[in-house]
Image (tube, helix red, strand yellow):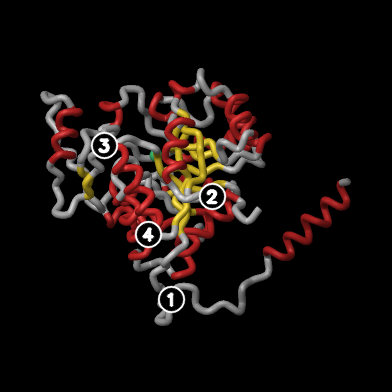
Amino acid sequence: MPVRLTSLLLAIAAIVSVPCFARDAPFAPDAALDNRVYEGPVIDMHVHTAGAGENGPPGSMVCVGAAADLRFDPREPWMEALGRSMARPACDDPIKGAMTDVENRDGTIAALRRHRARAVLSGDLASRKDWMDAAPAGLFIPAQYLSWADLPDYPPEAIAAAFDRGEIALLSEVTIQYRGVFADDPRFEPYWKMAEDKGIPVGIHVGVGPPGSPMVFPEYRLQNPKHLEAVLTRHPRLRVYMMHAGWPYAEDLKAMFYAWPQLMVDTGVLQVALTGEEYYRFLKDIVEAGFADRIMFGSDQMNWPGLIDEGVSAINAAPFLTYGQKKAILHDNAARFLRLDE
Ligand SMILES: [Zn+2]
């Protein structure tokens, strides 16, 4: 039907070419900027069923909004240097990790309840059951965690069956980057096809790992947001979010956002992995480019329940975000992405 297609394209061209004469000066400071604190409800797209000792010894500490201590002499193994910096963090007010698995689980649930939050909970069936049984109904939205090593145990058809049984609502977090496998690797293609066919949202790690990642995970390689281009081309109905927002590739992220309106990101761990200045510069860059509706809050809570409070506070304290943008990032974008109204 070439004629009808042509008239449709002409109609669209007419709509998008109407100049915005009615606009105020686009960059005039807005004295009446409504930047109130958004008080919930919140959706956290990125929580793990981790145990207290999964990221360093129980009680390990992390700093908020501070640069990682990356002074390093290779005479000492990096893991020892990293362990030392987590035991004695270089900031005044670090977040202390939970001492036990139960403290971590219950502390996470309490933190989410403080923010009237729901959270995407990433883990395996047994750990998810433990956490979901301890939480109010509906607080957690279950997701299958998938590392490269997990693939033999979780072929695409097993994930589709778990989705059909109602055991999971998402496939997330996909961490194949830690084995140097990128989103567009042909070996992962059957998962994308399955997720598109079943309508399962996917969260994939694209961005920052622990400092010195290749010395912790020898096959870790940097992944760029553009590694999703071929995936989204092949699977235009796929819903996918880049966990950790593809930091620091803001330019490529903007290009991807513009080309692929179905692509989303979460802010997981950025509030602790980067200086506050860098986190805000990155966030502001994306928001000012017009993509505030594509950003979803994620805490990447593993064994520091305080990450949830700090993550929500970081969004609320961002001086460049309006109330509406805070609400979008902390709740509305995720509700739309997850189709929670259905
Ligand atoms: Zn994560």
Image-based side of 294 in relation to 322, left or right: right
- In front of the other: 225 or 20: 225
What separation in Å lies between label 4 and label 1 (alpha carbons)? Answer: 24 Å
Residue 301, image x, y percentages: 35, 44
Q: Which mark is residue 211?
A: 3
Q: Is residue 172 visible?
A: yes
Q: Secondary structure at mark 2?
A: helix
Q: Which mark is residue 257?
A: 2
What separation in Å lies between label 2 and label 4 (alpha carbons)? Answer: 32 Å
Q: Secondary structure at mark 4?
A: helix
What separation in Å lies between label 1 and label 3 (alpha carbons)? Answer: 37 Å
Determine the residue positioned at 51% across, 31% down. Answer: 183
What separation in Å lies between label 3 and label 2 (alpha carbons)? Answer: 27 Å
Q: Residue furthest top?
A: 152
Q: Which mark is residue 114?
A: 4
Determine the residue positioned at 53% across, 23% down. Answer: 154
Q: Which mark is residue 34?
A: 1
Residue 213, image x, y percentages: 29, 31
The three-letter code of the residue at mark 3 reads: Pro
Badge 3, how many Cα within 10 Å: few under 14, some, many 20+? some
Q: Nearer the viewer, mark 2 or mark 4?
A: 4
Q: Nearer the viewer, mark 4 or mark 1?
A: 4
